[in-house]
Image (cartoon, rainbow, N blue to C red):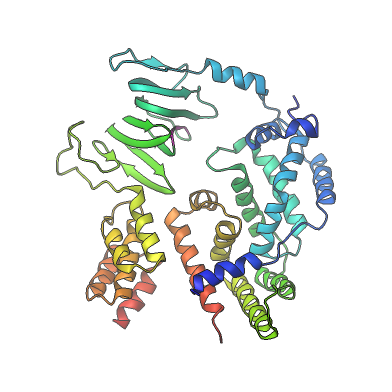
């Protein structure tokens, strides 16, 4: 049975129903979930694990979503659940390259962008701070970085993050605190 | 500008990471799915059937306290309305039985569950999970107000915090006459799920006195007790309180294997 028939009809269907359709073998339902959540997942994975192989990681995550759709227990939102699968996929990614280096490389790419403060001095200072922040984010250990990006940048509630990461809520808070403290130190003038 | 504020502001400026070619990525994903083994198809109810299921679910709009118990088909729970209640219960599905309680007070008597089975009451803005127990849940207009455990163990989750209640305990802490208090020897302090959050919020705004006060209320055996003990020591240290050293020692003695033990020991040496 197909739950998803046309683009007009899919709008009101809840993510949970789409997952059920996936469990029944409806590939269109997975396509709709991809439309809804792939950019959020890409943003999360790109910041937490680096941009290399990002498209492959996103695809692999949705394949795992397809396989695991029957196991969804509604203990978090579907989006958070997908991010949690993304964490496992990225961690198990069998590429030989060093993840930390990848992350650093990706953030180095981003440094060139920067923001637009008012004076040349401030522009330089601002870019330096942004660069230090990005470098510090990439330098965080993986647990801190994943938790921080998930909660602070993707705005996943701490309780949901704890469930999908398999840690206690207190651990999430502690990681957020530690990450924020390290990032705060990093943007200080050297 | 506080450094935390500056971090928050700079974070907003981090460049977005986007899929360069989402449509192509999607096409490739769906093509890769074609090579996946066919899923064992599971019967999925269409929307209409789900709606019908909701209609046939147990709905008890109002019932006096002495109304006979109603047992849902194949349910693990006997449900008794204590105060006019609005709730919905569906038969268990894949070992998980969920009751939505929107308003009112309901008594649940839950059979011992098998491994992998769950019984959860989504109680307004909170969540109550049990394993073979008898308990009351009180919700007022979508807000979880009270949980009373008559028998067994109950986990209460609300606002990101989790509390394990034992027989005779209630959530949140309130002095009431019913049901009878447990014997003193078995009585344990009930921790409000807000206690840790209150301490944490105070700590974040650098009000270490308030933070220490809140963390000190959480006993070490409570959920988050380890965290509370650690952050109590840190709060007192930040305050320069003479009791900080003692708090660190208490933490190290109680939680020698904590991942924070090294940090705490280092802190202790500096004292």
Q: Please indicate, yes or no, whether residue B41 appears anywhere in the rendered image.
A: yes
Relative to B212, is A161 on the left or the right?
right
Relative to A100, is A59 on the left or the right?
right
The quadrant in which the C terminus of chain B is found is: bottom left
Q: Residue furthest front?
A: A118
Residue in the image at 38% along x and 55% along y: B197
Residue in the image at 77% along x and 37% along y: B37
Q: Position of residue A120 (x, y in %)?
A: 70, 84
Q: Please indicate, yes or no, whether residue B152 appears anywhere in the rendered image.
A: no
Callout count? 0
> Which image quadrant for residue B186?
top left
Q: Position of residue B57 (x, y in %)?
A: 51, 18
Relative to A134, is B265 on the left or the right?
left
Q: Position of residue A161 (x, y in %)?
A: 53, 52
Relative to A53, is A166 on the left or the right?
left
State yes or no: residue B118 in magenta.
Answer: yes
Q: Is B61 or B155 nearer to us in this picture?
A: B61
Most common SS among magenta residues: strand
> Which image quadrant for residue B138?
top left
Q: Position of residue B191 (x, y in %)?
A: 29, 48
Q: Is A61 or B17 nearer to us in this picture?
A: B17
Q: Residue furthest left?
A: B184
Residue in the image at 55% along x and 57% along y: A151
Tell me where the magenta segment starts and ends, as one range.
Answer: B117-124
């Amino acid at each position: 049975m197909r739950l998803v028939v046309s683009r007009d009809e899919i709008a009101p269907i809840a993510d949970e129903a789409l997952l059920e359709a996936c469990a029944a073998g409806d590939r269109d339902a997975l396509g709709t979930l991809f439309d809804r959540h792939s950019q959020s997942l890409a943003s999360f994975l790109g910041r937490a694990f680096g941009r290399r192989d990002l498209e492959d990681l996103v695809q692999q995550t949705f394949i795992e979503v397809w396989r695991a759709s029957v196991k969804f227990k509604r203990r978090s939102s579907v989006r958070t659940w997908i991010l949690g699968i993304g964490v496992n996929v990225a961690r198990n990614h069998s590429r030989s390259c060093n993840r930390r280096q990848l992350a650093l490389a990706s953030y180095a790419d981003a440094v060139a962008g920067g923001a637009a403060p008012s004076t040349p001095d401030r522009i330089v200072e601002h870019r330096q701070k942004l660069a230090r922040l990005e470098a510090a984010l990439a330098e965080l250990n993986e647990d801190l970085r994943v938790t921080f990006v998930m909660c602070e940048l993707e705005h996943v509630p701490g309780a949901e993050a704890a469930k999908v990461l398999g840690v206690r809520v207190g651990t999430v808070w502690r990681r957020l605190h530690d990450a924020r403290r390290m990032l705060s130190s990093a943007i200080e003038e050297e | 500008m506080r450094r935390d504020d500056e971090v928050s502001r700079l974070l907003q400026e981090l460049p977005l990471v986007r899929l360069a070619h989402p449509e192509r990525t999607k096409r490739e994903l769906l093509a890769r799915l074609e090579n996946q083994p066919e899923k064992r198809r599971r019967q999925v109810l269409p929307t209409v059937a789900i709606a019908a299921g909701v209609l046939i679910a147990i709905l008890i709009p109002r019932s006096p306290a002495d109304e006979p118990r109603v047992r849902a088909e194949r349910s693990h729970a006997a449900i008794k309305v204590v105060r006019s209640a609005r709730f919905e219960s569906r038969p268990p599905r894949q070992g998980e039985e969920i009751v939505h309680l929107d308003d009112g007070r309901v008594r649940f008597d839950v059979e011992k569950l098998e491994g992998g089975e769950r019984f959860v009451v989504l109680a307004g803005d909170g969540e109550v999970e049990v394993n073979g127990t008898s308990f009351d849940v009180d919700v007022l207009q979508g807000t979880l107000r009270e949980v009373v455990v008559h028998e067994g163990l109950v986990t209460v989750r609300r606002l990101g915090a989790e509390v394990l209640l034992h027989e005779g305990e209630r959530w949140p802490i309130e002095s009431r006459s019913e049901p009878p208090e447990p014997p003193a020897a078995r009585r344990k302090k009930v921790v409000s799920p807000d206690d840790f959050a209150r301490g944490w919020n105070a700590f974040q705004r650098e009000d270490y006195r308030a933070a220490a006060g809140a963390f000190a209320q959480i006993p070490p055996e409570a959920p988050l007790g380890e965290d509370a003990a650690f952050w109590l020591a840190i709060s007192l240290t930040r305050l320069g309180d003479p009791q900080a050293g003692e708090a660190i020692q208490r933490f190290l003695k109680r939680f020698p294997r904590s991942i924070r033990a090294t940090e705490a020991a280092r802190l202790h040496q500096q004292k």
